[in-house]
């Protein structure tokens, strides 16, 4: 039987080793964000073969970030692997319905859990609101969408239910892409910001019934906007726009 080998490593060695293998997810972030947007808008149609070499050349990155982007999109259910490679699955009407049903179940429960706690820290939600206000004034729909999702994510974090939050985080990028698309069509983001201000005010008031009713209305509105945008995407694709 081989003797057990014990390897020790000093603090300095550990730091140097960690630095040498530290991942750089931001390197391919623009790849996954751009591909997600093209898939959501239907510009990349279902069945399109996504070839690593072509994507690497198009985005001027190595194949590693491209591979990471495709794995992320596969986790979100937007692409799928087959024997011959990776292909676009797309975002169909059924997918939108499933995603919003899932979000409704998750977020209503997250807010209920928050409101059941005697003391809840809403600093993260308030900070996200401040960024939303700035983005609305600057008419920056993509940054607004990020702040919007940060606002909603704050309730998952405050709920104290880590598995609930983990499921939300899995699908958050897809919702971020969907929001960026629908927000881009809005000439004025201030009304959406105002809706979030009202939502936080009612939640902080601690009355579950009106808070849940307003959140349901909020999510239904987001759902309707995405369905309307999807209808336009399909019409444009059929017309060859």
Image: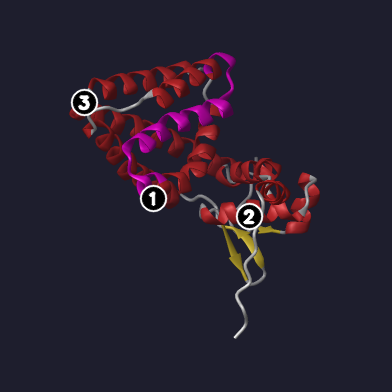
Q: What stretch is highlighted in magenta?
A: 136-165
Q: What element carries label 2?
A: helix
Q: Which residue is drawn at 25% across and 27% down?
A: 211
Q: Would you say 208 lies left or right of 30 here?
A: left
Q: Earlier in the sequence, mark 1 or mark 2?
A: 2
Q: Position of residue 72 (x, y in %)?
A: 58, 52
Badge 1: few (under 14), some or many (20 or more) residues near its Cα, within 10 Å? few
Mark closest to the chain's N terminus, 1 or 3: 1
Magenta segment's dominant SS is helix
Residue beneath label 2, please? Answer: 70
Disc 1 target residue: 98
| Mark 3 / mark 2, whichever is N-terminal | 2
Q: Is residue 152 magenta?
A: yes
Q: Mark 3 points at which residue?
A: 210
Residue 55 bears which disc, if any? none
In the picture as drawn, the residue positioned furthest to the bottom comes out as 1
Q: In which quarter of the image is the N terminus?
A: bottom right
- The picture places residue 64, in percent across and down from the top left corner, at 72, 54
Q: Give me the residue at 37% from left, 38% from top.
A: 156
């Amino acid at each position: 039987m081989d003797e057990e080998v014990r390897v020790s490593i000093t603090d300095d060695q550990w730091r140097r080793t960690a630095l040498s293998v530290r991942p750089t997810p931001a390197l391919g972030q623009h790849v996954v964000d751009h591909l997600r947007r093209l898939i959501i808008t239907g510009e990349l149609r279902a069945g399109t073969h996504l070839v690593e070499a072509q994507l690497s050349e198009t985005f001027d990155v190595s194949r590693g970030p491209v591979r990471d982007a495709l794995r992320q999109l596969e986790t979100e259910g937007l692409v799928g692997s087959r024997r011959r490679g990776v292909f676009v699955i797309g975002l169909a009407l059924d997918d939108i319905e499933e995603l919003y049903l899932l979000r409704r179940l998750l977020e209503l429960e997250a807010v209920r859990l928050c409101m059941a706690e005697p003391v809840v820290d809403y600093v993260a939600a308030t900070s996200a609101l401040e960024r939303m206000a700035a983005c609305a004034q600057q008419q920056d729909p993509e940054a607004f969408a990020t702040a919007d999702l940060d606002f909603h994510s704050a309730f998952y974090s405050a709920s104290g239910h880590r598995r609930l939050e983990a499921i939300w985080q899995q699908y958050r990028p897809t919702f971020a892409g969907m929001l960026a698309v629908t927000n881009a069509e809005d000439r004025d983001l201030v009304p959406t910001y105002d809706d979030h201000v009202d939502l936080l005010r009612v939640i902080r008031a601690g009355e579950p019934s009106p808070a849940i009713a307003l959140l349901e209305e909020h999510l239904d509105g987001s759902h309707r906007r995405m369905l309307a945008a999807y209808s336009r995407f399909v019409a444009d694709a059929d017309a060859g726009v």
